[in-house]
Amino acid sequence: MIDMGMKKETKRRHAPYTKLKAYLNQIGMTQAELAKLLNKSRYALNQNLNGTGGDFSLSEVRLICMTLGISADEFFIEPQVSNTKQQDAS
């Protein structure tokens, strides 16, 4: 007998990019458009965004940031890393 109440846990390789996904929605850019910009499939992009596949490459992060006019620090680096950088600079 199968327990239908059990939820399958998703294995993530890295934290999902929820802030980037929200920003894309805010500016009206679809994941299909971003995938085309990065020359990859929507499926591969979706895995990047959700943390279930590989992470974005540095060149992809640069292209996204330059195209959308956003900060890599704000959208791609975990907050505790940025906080550490700021403390080290003091």
Image (spheres, rainbow, N blue to C red):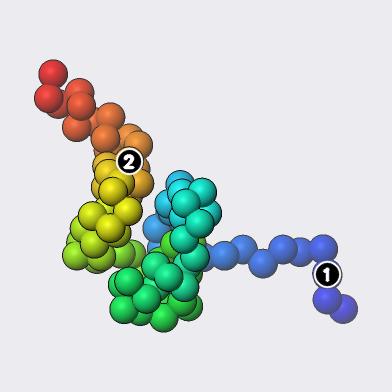
- The picture quadrant where one finds residue 47 is bottom left
- Residue 80, position as x, y percentages in the image: 33, 35
**Residue at the outermost right position:** 1
The quadrant of the image that shows the N terminus is: bottom right
The kind of residue on which mark 2 rests is Glu
Q: Is residue 87 left or right of residue 41?
A: left
Q: Is residue 9 left or right of residue 1?
A: left
Q: Which residue is found at the position 20% from the left and 23% from the top?
A: 87
- Examine the rendered structure and indicate whether residue 66 appears above or below residue 89: below
The quadrant of the image that shows the C terminus is: top left
Q: Which residue is found at the position 83% from the left and 69% from the top?
A: 4
Residue marked by disc 1: 4
**Residue at the outermost top position:** 90
Q: Nearer the viewer, residue 31 or 6?
A: 31
The kind of residue on which mark 1 rests is Met
Q: CA distance from mark 1 to mark 2?
A: 39 Å
- Residue 6, position as x, y percentages in the image: 76, 64
User: Which circle, 1 or 2, is nearer the viewer?
Assistant: 2
**Residue at the outermost left position:** 89
- Residue 51 seen by the camera: no
Which badge, 1 or 2, is on the more N-terminal residue?
A: 1
Q: Which residue is found at the position 27% from the left and 38% from the top?
A: 81
Residue marked by disc 2: 74
- Disc number for residue 24: none
- Residue 32 seen by the camera: yes
- Residue 67, position as x, y percentages in the image: 28, 58
Q: Which residue is found at the position 28% from the left and 29% from the top?
A: 83
- Examine the rendered structure and indicate whether residue 82 appears above or below residue 65: above
